[in-house]
């Protein structure tokens, strides 16, 4: 009898240990799914600005470089948005400053002064190589380092609106991070430059449209083709003390990758105009999940607040974006009572993104 009790206790202990081991295994497995985030602007990197790759090769745009063979090798690339700014860096700057005799520390300070408070004038990328791919036959230096044949480099894009770095590409390449020609990024990621070209072209946008400012930017893969797309939300601003009849307007621009090019979708009738007497927040956010994205907004007046959620879906067969669902939550301010409603394609049929008008659903 005593022996049976001992055996029973041992079995319980073994099963408990197995369960703990399985739980720990699952925890370790899940931890691998957590993507590491970086802040390449962190002062701990002490990345220096420069306009040269080496003694004989200038760049056509400013770069910042960091190298530590025990950490990583990366270069931040500031690609100018305007032709005038690009001409300054690729031509004027090199003529003004004697690059051959300029002290690297002084050069870094001079370039930093021109960039630090003007980040929105650039499309900013980071070409990042982890330490495990760095090779050298001597000391760790930019002159001696080379890359492993199986290097898995990563390219990140800095979003000024989100103030964060988003990984946009993995590169199986032995290219060193110091890339002198900005065309590498312009040709590889045309979506990031499309909007800037439109804004600069007055024949495409009216004077009123040119007053729009970017409120939100999302770097996502809507069509699930492995290439990054961009969702941009633009809004106007009140210049002076607004009158009751004044209002802010909004538009949404989507740059969708399309083979080696891209398509642009635009709609200015998804987000409702925002008036001074609106007791709610107006436009709030864009949430994205796989091929779906939802525009969230809240508008209030007359004793109630309406939270609306407009969801669109990318259709792979037709290579188009269509309205998927429109739902609202109406809250009565006096009582707090809520009323919900939801419309789907069974109610409104097939509505392309650019044809959607929220007034036709309300």
Image: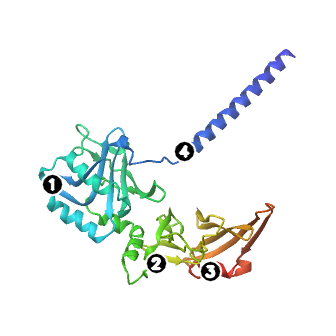
Q: Is residue 71 above or below residue 339?
A: above
Q: Is residue 289 visible?
A: no
Q: Horizontally, is 10 left or right of 292 in the view? A: right
Residue 136 position within the rendered picture, expressed as x and y whole percent measured from the top left: 26, 41
What is the C-alpha distance between the residues marked 2 and 3? Answer: 18 Å
Q: Earlier in the sequence, mark 3 or mark 4?
A: 4
Residue 33 position within the rendered picture, expressed as x and y whole percent measured from the top left: 55, 48
Which residue is label 1 attached to?
Answer: 99
Q: Earlier in the sequence, mark 1 or mark 4?
A: 4
What is the C-alpha distance between the residues marked 1 and 3? Answer: 55 Å
Closer to us: 119 or 23? 119
Q: Residues within 10 Å of mark 1 (few under 14, many from 20)?
A: some
Quadrant position of residue 316 = bottom right
Residue 117 position within the rendered picture, expressed as x and y whole percent measured from the top left: 35, 56
Which residue is label 2 attached to?
Answer: 209
What is the C-alpha distance between the residues marked 2 and 4? Answer: 45 Å
Q: Earlier in the sequence, mark 1 or mark 3?
A: 1
Q: Horizontally, is 74 left or right of 108 in the view? A: right
Closer to us: 306 or 11? 306
Mark in front: 2 vs 4: 2
What is the C-alpha distance between the residues marked 1 and 4? Answer: 45 Å
Mark 4 residue element: loop
Q: Residues within 10 Å of mark 3 (few under 14, many from 20)?
A: some
Position of the C terminus by quadrant = bottom right
Q: Is residue 148 above or below residue 261?
A: above
User: Of all residues shown, which one is farthest toward the top?
Assistant: 2
Which residue is label 3 attached to?
Answer: 357
Q: Horizontally, is 317 left or right of 180 in the view? A: right
């Amino acid at each position: 009898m005593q022996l049976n009790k001992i055996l029973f206790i041992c079995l319980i202990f073994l099963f408990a240990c197995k369960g703990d081991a399985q739980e720990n295994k699952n925890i370790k497995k899940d931890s691998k799914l957590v993507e590491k985030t970086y802040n390449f602007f962190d002062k701990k990197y002490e990345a220096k600005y420069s306009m040269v790759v080496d003694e004989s090769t200038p760049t056509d745009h400013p770069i910042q470089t960091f190298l530590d063979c025990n950490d990583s090798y990366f270069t931040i690339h500031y690609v100018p948005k305007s032709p005038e700014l690009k001409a300054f860096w690729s031509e004027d700057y090199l003529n003004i400053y004697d690059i051959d005799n300029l002290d690297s520390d002084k050069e870094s300070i001079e370039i930093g002064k021109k960039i630090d408070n003007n980040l929105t004038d650039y499309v900013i990328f980071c070409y990042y190589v982890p330490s495990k791919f760095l090779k050298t036959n001597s000391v760790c230096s930019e002159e001696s380092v080379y890359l492993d044949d199986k290097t898995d480099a990563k390219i990140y894009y800095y979003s000024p609106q989100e103030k964060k770095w988003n990984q946009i590409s993995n590169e199986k390449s032995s290219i060193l991070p110091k890339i002198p020609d900005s065309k590498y990024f312009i040709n590889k990621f045309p979506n990031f430059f499309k909007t800037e070209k439109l804004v600069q072209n007055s024949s495409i946008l009216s004077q009123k449209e040119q007053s729009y400012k970017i409120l939100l930017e999302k770097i996502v893969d809507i069509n699930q083709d492995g290439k990054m797309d961009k969702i941009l939300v633009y809004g106007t601003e009140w210049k002076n003390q607004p009158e009751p009849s004044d209002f802010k307007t909004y538009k949404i621009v989507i740059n969708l990758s399309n083979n080696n090019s891209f398509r642009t979708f635009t709609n200015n009738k998804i987000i409702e105009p925002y008036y001074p007497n609106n007791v709610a927040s107006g436009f709030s956010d864009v949430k994205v999940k796989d091929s779906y994205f939802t525009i969230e907004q809240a508008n209030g007046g007359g004793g109630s607040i309406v939270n609306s959620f407009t969801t669109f879906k990318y259709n792979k067969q037709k290579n188009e974006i269509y309205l998927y669902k429109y739902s609202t939550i109406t809250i009565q301010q006096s009582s707090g009572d809520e009323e919900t409603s939801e419309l789907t394609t069974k109610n409104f049929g097939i509505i392309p993104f650019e044809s959607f008008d929220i007034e036709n659903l309300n």
